[in-house]
Image (spheres, rainbow, N blue to C red):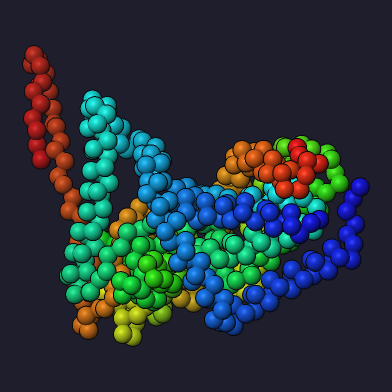
């Protein structure tokens, strides 16, 4: 028999829908009780997430290895020759080394710019089912982290602290569709607004249409008042495509972020930036091409065998 | 419907919420990953009466709004899940062709997850949220459908047993 609904059922639906609308209204009006409930929940969840991170890391490493199987085939073949104990040790060492490299990179960047930073491990990556891009780090207000602080990796900007709890913080990634940052192009100092697109690529909208932008230009953060939410001079990404539509009101460009958000292990939160702007000093150096040796073969008619000569 | 029975089901949803926040989000699965709480709530509703479905949606929605990965205001997921869970319960209620067939419930859950996310997106747009590029949205929706299609048949038997234990044996698949 089909459900036709009775008065009690209808009343229940109406009460539930009105309650949810009431909650939305309260939250949008910034009622403290709602924020308190959320903060309490996140504080309670942090130990569970830390335990989950420890428990899940072997499975996550396995999934990561399976994804990059093609690239690490040679490495896997070498590992096959080793015994189980050595393989396990190497696996643990690899994780520690990767985190160390990331930590070194982020400390180098922060030290060059004179930022005072707090390092943190990424303990959780937000589900994309809500169409947002976030990570959770294992440091919070007890470590001096507050909302609207810049978050860095060894390559450049990662995002901004959205919520800070006592021992963890939620970071909005630069790839989040709601993320916006004032950016300038290194060298030419043209300014624009960069917005996330849900992927590793963002869109830069220049404020002045008369200026030009080129593929390969590096983007840096313009900075905010008192360095919050953004400290100046942080490398953001590189222009990979320019939209030169003649009818466009403003010039736009596609930007690839320097940071790879899917492999973040260790990040740093800038708790206080130096008063002086580091200008363009943090722009990553362009890679130098290595000369590839070519082999030229001279064949002489009537000779027995040609002799190869290596030239550069 | 007994309110006591509904309260008895709350530990199941609490467990799903903790498992989702503590473990599933750590796996960093591609294409958006799995939303375990959403899948459990929709399967539970598909096995229940519309009234229980709406209450289930309310409870699961509150939990999802409390998740730190939820970008919207408190009540956003709640409203979406009340509607989605009521609708899925309404479609299945009294129709043994749907309720007695696990494949139909798994299919209904997959459609329900995608429809919930589209509704969440539309409501978010109405509330002024940024949702990103169309390509990324389509990719995430397809990813959700894929993961739900894999996970829901695996969870169905367990949830049906738990549902039968809470509400009686009549709803057993």
For residue B33, above or below residue A13: above
- Outermost residue toward the front in this view: B4
Which quadrant does the C terminus of chain A fall into?
Answer: top left
Residue A310 coordinates in the image, percent (x, y):
9, 33
Which residue is located at x 24 percent, y 27 percent? Answer: A83
Residue B159 coordinates in the image, percent (x, y):
66, 43
For residue A271, above or below residue A68: below
- Residues A221 and A274: in front is A274
For residue A114, above or below residue B136: below
Residue A108 coordinates in the image, percent (x, y):
18, 64
Residue B156 coordinates in the image, percent (x, y):
66, 40
- Residues B73 and B162: in front is B162
In the rendered image, which quarter is residue B147 located in? top right
Which residue is located at x 65 percent, y 56 percent? Answer: B10
Which residue is located at x 19 percent, y 75 percent? Answer: A114
- Outermost residue toward the bottom in this view: A225
Is residue A244 visible from the viewing direction of this image? no
Which residue is located at x 81 percent, y 56 percent? Answer: B1
Residue A134 shown left or right of residue A80 in the figure = right
């Amino acid at each position: 028999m089909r459900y036709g609904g009775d008065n009690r059922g209808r009343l229940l639906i109406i009460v539930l829908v009105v309650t949810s609308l009431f909650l939305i209204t309260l939250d949008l009006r910034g009622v403290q009780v709602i924020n308190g409930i959320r903060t309490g929940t996140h504080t309670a969840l942090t130990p569970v997430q830390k335990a989950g991170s420890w428990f899940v890391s072997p499975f996550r490493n396995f999934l990561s290895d399976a994804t990059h199987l093609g690239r690490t085939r040679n490495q896997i073949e070498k590992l096959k020759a080793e015994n189980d104990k050595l393989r396990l040790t190497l696996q643990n060492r690899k994780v520690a080394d990767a985190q160390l490299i990331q930590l070194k990179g982020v400390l180098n960047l922060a030290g060059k710019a004179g930022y005072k930073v707090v390092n943190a491990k990424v303990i959780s990556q937000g589900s994309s089912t809500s169409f947002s891009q976030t990570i959770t780090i294992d440091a919070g207000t007890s470590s001096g982290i507050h909302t609207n602080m810049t978050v860095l990796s060894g390559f450049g900007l990662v995002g901004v602290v959205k919520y800070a709890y006592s021992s963890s913080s939620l970071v909005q990634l630069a790839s989040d569709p709601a993320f916006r940052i004032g950016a300038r192009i290194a060298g030419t100092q043209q300014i624009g607004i960069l917005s996330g697109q849900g992927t590793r690529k963002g869109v830069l909208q220049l404020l002045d249409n008369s200026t030009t932008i080129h593929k390969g230009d590096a983007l840096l953060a313009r900075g905010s008042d008192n360095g919050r939410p953004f400290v100046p001079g942080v490398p953001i990404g590189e222009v990979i495509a320019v939209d030169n539509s003649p009818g466009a009101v403003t010039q736009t460009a596609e930007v690839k972020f320097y940071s790879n958000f899917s492999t973040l292990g260790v990040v740093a939160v800038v708790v206080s930036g130096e008063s002086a702007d580091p200008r363009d000093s943090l722009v990553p150096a362009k890679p130098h091409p290595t000369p590839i040796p070519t082999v030229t073969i001279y064949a002489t008619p009537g000779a027995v065998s040609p002799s190869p000569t290596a030239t550069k | 419907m007994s309110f006591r029975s509904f309260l008895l089901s709350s530990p199941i949803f609490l467990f799903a919420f903790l498992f989702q926040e503590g473990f599933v989000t750590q796996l960093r699965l591609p294409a958006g990953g799995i939303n375990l709480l959403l899948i459990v709530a929709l399967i539970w509703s598909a096995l229940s009466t519309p009234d229980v479905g709406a209450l289930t949606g309310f409870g699961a929605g509150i939990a999802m709004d409390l998740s730190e990965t939820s970008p919207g205001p408190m009540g956003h997921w709640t409203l979406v899940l009340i509607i989605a869970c009521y609708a899925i319960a309404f479609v299945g209620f009294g129709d043994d062709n749907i309720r007695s067939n696990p494949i139909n419930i798994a299919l209904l859950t997959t459609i329900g997850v995608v429809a919930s996310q589209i509704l969440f997106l539309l409501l978010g747009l109405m509330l002024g949220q940024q949702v990103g590029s169309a390509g990324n949205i389509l990719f995430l929706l397809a990813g959700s459908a894929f993961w739900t299609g894999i996970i829901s048949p695996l969870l169905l038997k367990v949830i049906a047993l738990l549902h039968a234990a809470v509400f009686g044996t009549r709803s057993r698949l």
